[in-house]
Image (cartoon, grey):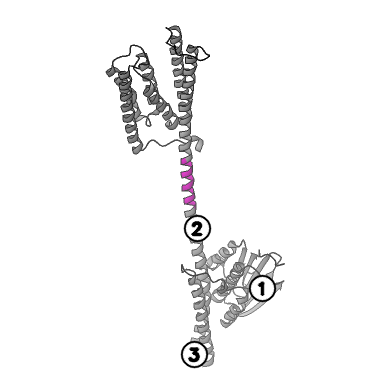
């Protein structure tokens, strides 16, 4: 992906900055040209007039206005004008060299086609060295310069040639490398921005997922609490209504069960809704577990069911989350028996296996179909078990009634 990255074009602010840079470079060129002419320190013999030299500085500086929009074209134009200015002996080369440096650098930093950028700069630099070689040969074949103060061990002409060659090698190599570094830096910044955006999106997605999971958990708990207790209250209230005129004591017991069940439901709802408060600490002790199953059985018995309960295997402590899920599975299964099964007896078996807790709830009712159930109880069971990596098996029994079998891995480490 990033090997094919293309740098976005210059912004409006960067384009304005290029205009300012071109204006500053032109002002410096005019000043340097004026100073050179005022001192008579000409690089070339018999230079043109001051106005013509200023004109060369102007045409060299103007392309910099669009250097980031058209970097390749600007470099080619500046390179051609640079050689043309030297052919016409147009004053000093300090500012024109700086303009050429800036043009080569800009191609390295902004040209989208990296292959074109590389070979175009190599071509321009090669052309400049050819021009430098031609100029040096012409200087060697021409009249010797005045080296009256020369005192080094080397021939002054050879020393001048080597100085110019080494200076230009450093000059062009530096322009090339700095341009590459600018391109790489822009790509790294784009990578960091992309990674930061990906991280932000991932965090938002995780947050949304956590919120959705919490909503599902609250919905499951609300369903389990409300469905079970309201079912028991409805059955007891109906029983009280039927015997109210004939058996006052039985009606009183049924209404008392309704009252107790309502209080239990309110207590559980308060504990559940309390976690929604931002300043509330979760009360883990308030969450029901395996020790609370007898109360659940008593509630089912109060609804008219015969409940038998068996525990098999080596009883041991299980993680609180597993215990809560096991409690809710039994609660939902009993609620479904009360509401849908028209059963007389329900059998609840709990098996402590080597690495799992298995629950099996069977009844002798009419064996309701899972496909026709309109509630969310079975979905909630599967979601609870999936959190712990457990499994759920539900369906009508062959002989009669309905089966709910749940397996929950127990990962709590054994105490030494």
Q: Quadrant of the C terminus?
A: bottom right
On the image, numbered disc 3 is attached to which residue? 244
Q: Secondary structure at mark 1?
A: strand
Q: Secondary structure at mark 2?
A: helix
Which badge, 2 or 3, is on the more N-terminal residue?
A: 2
Can I make out residue 112 in this image? no
Label annotation for residue 373: none
Is 191 included in the stretch rendered in magenta?
yes
On the image, numbered disc 2 is attached to which residue? 209
Which badge, 1 or 3, is on the more N-terminal residue?
A: 3
Q: Is residue 178 above or below residue 243?
A: above
Q: What segment carries the magenta color?
A: 189-202
On the image, numbered disc 1 is attached to which residue? 349
Cα separation, mark 2 vs mark 3, equals 51 Å
Q: Nearer the viewer, residue 159 or 333?
A: 159
Can I make out residue 331 in this image? yes
Q: Quadrant of residue 340?
A: bottom right
Q: Which residue lies at the image location 39% right of the left edge and 21% below the top edge?
A: 79
Residue 148 image point, x, y percent: 44, 11
């Amino acid at each position: 992906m990033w090997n094919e990255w293309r740098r976005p074009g210059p912004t409006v602010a960067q384009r304005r900055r290029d205009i300012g840079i071109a204006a500053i470079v032109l002002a410096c060129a005019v000043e340097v040209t004026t100073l050179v002419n005022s001192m008579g320190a000409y690089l070339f013999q018999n230079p043109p007039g001051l106005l013509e030299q200023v004109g060369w500085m102007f045409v060299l500086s103007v392309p910099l206005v669009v250097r980031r929009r058209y970097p390749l074209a600007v470099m080619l134009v500046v390179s051609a004008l640079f050689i043309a200015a030297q052919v016409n002996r147009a004053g000093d080369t300090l500012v024109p060299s700086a303009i050429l440096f800036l043009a080569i650098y800009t191609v390295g930093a902004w040209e989208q086609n990296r292959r074109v950028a590389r070979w175009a700069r190599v071509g321009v630099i090669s052309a400049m060295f050819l021009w430098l070689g031609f100029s040096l040969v012409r200087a060697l074949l021409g009249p010797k310069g005045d080296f009256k103060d020369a005192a080094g061990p080397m021939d002054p002409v050879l020393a001048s040639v080597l100085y110019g060659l080494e200076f230009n090698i450093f000059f062009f190599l530096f322009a090339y490398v700095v341009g590459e570094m600018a391109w790489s830096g822009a790509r790294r910044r784009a990578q960091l921005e992309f990674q930061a955006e990906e991280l932000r999106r991932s965090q938002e997605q995780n947050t949304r997922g956590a919120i959705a999971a919490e909503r599902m958990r609250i919905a499951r708990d609300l369903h389990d609490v409300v469905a079970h207790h309201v079912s028991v209250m409805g059955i007891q209230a109906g029983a009280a209504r039927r015997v109210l005129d004939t058996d006052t004591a039985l009606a009183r017991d049924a209404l008392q069960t309704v009252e107790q069940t309502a209080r239990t439901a309110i207590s559980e709802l308060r504990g559940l809704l309390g976690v929604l408060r931002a300043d509330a600490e979760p009360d883990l002790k308030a969450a029901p577990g395996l020790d609370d199953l007898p109360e659940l059985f008593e509630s089912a018995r109060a609804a008219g069911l015969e409940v038998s309960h068996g525990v098999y295997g080596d009883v041991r402590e299980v993680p609180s989350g597993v215990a809560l899920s096991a409690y809710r599975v039994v609660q939902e299964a009993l609620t479904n028996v009360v509401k849908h099964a028209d059963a007389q007896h329900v059998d609840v078996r709990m098996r402590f296996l080597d690495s799992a807790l298995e629950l099996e709830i069977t009844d002798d009712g009419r064996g309701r179909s899972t496909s026709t159930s309109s509630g969310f109880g079975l979905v909630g069971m599967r979601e609870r078990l999936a959190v712990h990596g457990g499994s759920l098996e539900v369906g009508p029994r062959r002989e009669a009634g309905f089966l709910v079998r749940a397996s929950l891995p127990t990962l709590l480490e054994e105490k030494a």
